[in-house]
């Protein structure tokens, strides 16, 4: 995330959002690892599922950061919360 924040002016936010959604889709498909092991467990499937969960976090950061970046060019009401 520090790399993305440092290079934010050089990164196209639409490509960042698309990359996040593609990675999210690939992570969803890789949950078949749990079905493939039939719930037998072990260190390999544990590390695999751990990596998939970490991948979901990275994809969420990509998409959320890209959406806020795109919305910041629009009306300020889109990114500010009105309490009244």
Image: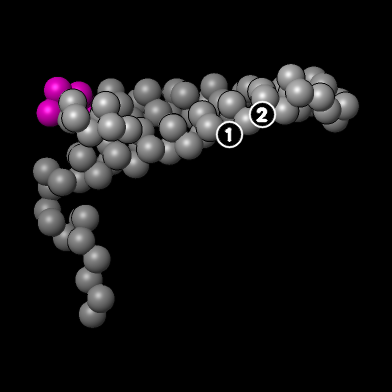
User: Can you identify the residue that label 1 sits on?
Assistant: 53
Magenta span: predominant SS is loop
Position of residue 65 relative to residue 45, above or below, is below
Label 1, residues with CA under 10 Å away: few <14, some 14-19, many ≥20: some
Position of residue 76 relative to residue 57, above or below, is below
- Picture quadrant where residue 53 is located: top right
Label 2, residues with CA under 10 Å away: few <14, some 14-19, many ≥20: some
User: Can you identify the residue that label 2 sits on?
Assistant: 49
Which residue is depicted at the point 32% across and 33% down?
1
Residue stretch in magenta: 9-13
Let me know if residue 59 is in the magenta part: no
Which residue is depicted at the point 81% across and 24% down?
42
Which residue is depicted at the point 29% across and 39% down?
65
Tag 2–tag 1 contact (CB < 8 Å): yes
Q: Where is residue 79? Give x, y as percent.
A: 21, 55
State the residue in front, 5 or 69.
5
Would you say residue 73 is visible in this rendering? yes
Q: Where is residue 22? Give x, y as percent.
A: 45, 23
Would you say residue 28 is visible in this rendering? no
């Amino acid at each position: 995330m520090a790399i993305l924040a440092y290079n934010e002016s050089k990164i196209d936010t639409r490509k960042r959002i698309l990359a996040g959604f593609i990675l999210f889709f690939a992570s969803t498909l890789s949950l078949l690892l749990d079905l493939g092991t039939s719930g037998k467990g072990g260190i390999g499937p544990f590390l695999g599922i751990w990596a998939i969960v970490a991948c979901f976090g990275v994809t969420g950061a990509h998409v959320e950061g890209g959406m806020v970046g795109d919305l910041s060019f629009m009306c300020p009401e889109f990114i500010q919360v009105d309490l009244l």
